[in-house]
Image: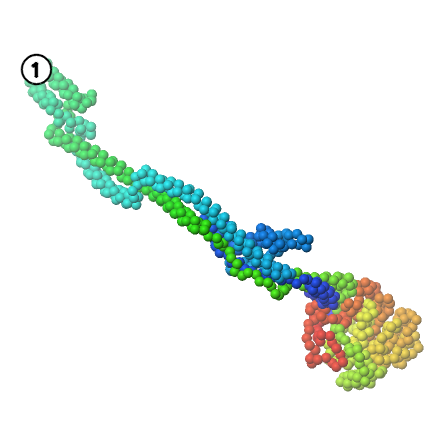
Amino acid sequence: METKNYPQEIDVQQYWLVLKRRWPILAAVFLASLGASGLAIRSQSPEYQATGMLLFKSDRISSLTKVGEKIGDLESLMREGNPLETQAVIVNSQPILKEVINTLQLKNKQGNLLDPESLKIKVEPIVSTDVLKVSFTSEKPELAASVVNTLMKSYVANNIQSNRVQVVAAGEFIQKQLLTSRQELERASEAVRQFKNQYKIIELPEEASAAIKNIAKLDEELNQARATLADVNAQQAKVATQLNLSQKQAIEVASLSQMSGVQDLLAELQKVQSKLASEQARYTSNHPSIAYLKNQEATLTSLLQRRTQQSLGTQRNVPVSNLQMGKLKEDLASDYVKFQSQSQGLGKKIQALSNIKKTYQQRLAILPNLEKTQGDLERRLTVAQTDYQNLVTRQQEIEVAEKQTIGNARIIQPAEVPKKRIISKMTILLAAGGVFVGFLFGTAIAFFVDLIDRSLKTVKEIESFFGYTLIGLIPKFETPKFESKTSKFERKNSQFESNSKFASIPLIGDRVSSRVIVAYSPRTVIHEAYQMLQANLKFISHKEVRTIVVTSSVPGEGKSEVSANLAAIIANSGRKVLLVDADMRQPSQHHLWGFINSVGLSNVIVGQDEFSEAVQQVTENLSILTGGVQPPNPSSLIDSEGMASLIKKLSQTYDYIIFDTPPLVGTADAAVLGKMVDGVLLVARPGVVENSTATAAKSLLQRSEANILGVIANAVNIKHEPDSYFYYSYPRGGQNTSGIAIKGNEQWVQK
């Protein structure tokens, strides 16, 4: 059978199991703490609490001045927090407390006036209201009411006085602000006036609209002028092409053609030249007439150039050929000059219109800035006017407020003398402290006791410590303390009648212990636990196990009880079983089965009696060999050839032989006998075996090299074990067998 590794339980479950094991200690400490707390509570003096209420209104002073609204105005603070908390601090301030102490002459035990810090008055706002609740606790109910009423009256009186002082201060402040505001209003008005004069502003929106219209009209005129200029320039270019003269020459010709002096000389020169041409046809070049005419021609040409230079105002000579034009060219030259004049005029007109348009555009460009500046100045003026008007209004309100004598708080509920005592904080603290301290110390002591307890407390600890396979888990059960002999016989007879295996052979002895539960209670949880143990023995080893030693680490773990029940459950399955009481120091099987231990194992080993005379029959399949007479040296009998021969001989007769041996600690009987049999079963009981004794027992088993079949956990309190080992349900049939009390009525199945 494979060893099952159970998952590690979380620490919380382990702690809970410790508390379940040590709950009596926890309960005792807890109750003791509650008792001490109760005595302390009873020693407390009775206390009475008086309560009054104050209603608050908006702080009118702040609304008059409009200065520091976020600091002193209750109405504005309601949006950011609870202003009553500030007033609660003021109500509970030292000046108010001193006034209460002096008024009521509150003194301490030494006869001195109380210190304000020792006067514990509770002031708290009521949620979602403008009301403060004032409370005071005292051993004297009349004093508690007097303190609360005096405190509220003192606060209201101080509040009224404070308001008066604030009104006067507000009036002085407003007067100063009026002067400053008037000066600011005058400066703002002057700034607006200077701005309008500087930029010649009447109405900026109308001016901007007119400027846009004028720019559109100028654009239209410019387009017309540019079209006309283009037409004139085209005609001028055409005339210039016909004249075949440069612009300058055409202008000169046109100018000279209109001068009579130049034209007269040009006419005389033309006559002379005509006559010279006629004479040259008649005479040679040396003829006096020819020479005369040439001289006259040169004179007229020189004179013509001088006249031309004088007319044009330049020293440049104009070719005579340019002056000798016909009527058509003169007209063309005159048209050219006219077109030139028109072109120049149109150019100047376009330039003038462009300059005007640019002026309008520049004005229009600065209009937004002017509007912004004008708006800023006018807003500044409006603000100054509004501030001044508000200050004038507040000054009038302050003059009215100076004549009033009301505050912003009033008493809506005076404190009455309390008639019932209250549960004080100290009482609550003592009660809560008793519960908390009791549970805390109880838990600590429980854990401490569990820590110093060196026993193996749970099945898991036993399995982990020994390292052997857990093949059986027997729940803890109790039997009735008192049971008559007649009822026992009736119980045995009814049991054996119900079970054919046991009823076939009559009982030897007058009674069987109720601890041998499987012998007469086949429908109980314990019976099923031993059935599980029997089933596990079949698969615990690869070879058949027929001879088994049952032992434990120390006395009191229930090895004899386990041996008896295991033998009975195997016999009940139809196998021949011999139960041998090998604990010859303190034999116990004869007590469990109701036999007389006059002859037994010791007698058979030494040869004093035959086995057939010593063995006692319980049923057809179950036989008991008691310990017999106690020998002087039991270990020598166990470790003898006689014992080995007896085991070999008995193995031929019985299917199973179970040996109930002494505990491992203190004797070596179980270890010695374990070498002679097929295997050893170690019985361990949680809370009985300690770490040191378990270590010694484990060491002895390891040195003996016996075949350890596994561990049987006996008398296990299921409530003290983790849930991972088993689950619970009610026994089959819904009730226990008569005469047996199973703790908790638990049914378990090993996982």
The one nearer the camera, 220 or 584, is 220
Relative to 476, does residue 191 appear above or below in the rendering?
above
User: Crowdedness of circle 1 by 10 Å Cα count: few (<14), some, many (20+)?
Assistant: some
Residue 242: x %, y % from top left: 16, 32
Residue at 81% from the left image edge and 76% from the top image edge: 564
In the figure, residue 606 lies in which quadrant? Answer: bottom right
| Residue for point 10% across, 15% down | 291
- Whole-percent x, y for residue 439 in the image: 70, 63
Number of numbered discs visible in the structure rendering: 1
Judged from the image, the secondary structure of the residue bearing numbered disc 1 is helix
**Quadrant into which the C terminus falls:** bottom right
Q: Is residue 345 visible?
A: yes
Colour option used: rainbow
Q: Is residue 702 left or right of residue 102?
A: right
Quadrant of the image containing the N terminus: bottom right
Q: Position of residue 341 (x, y in %)?
A: 18, 32
Using the rendered view, name the quadrant where residue 304 is placed.
Answer: top left
Q: Amino acid at mark 1?
A: Ser
Can you identify the residue that label 1 sits on?
289
Residue ID at (21%, 33%): 344
403 relative to 745, above or below = above
Seen at 46% across and 52% down, the residue is: 404
Up-down: is 570 above or below 450? below
Foreground pick, 547 / 222: 222
Q: Position of residue 267 (x, y in %)?
A: 9, 23
Is 59 drawn above or below residue 285 in the view shown? Answer: below
Q: Is residue 746 left or right of residue 71?
A: right
Place residue 150 in its image quadrant.
Answer: bottom right
Residue 9 seen in this snapshot: no
Q: Tell which of 638 and 212 is nearer to you.
A: 212
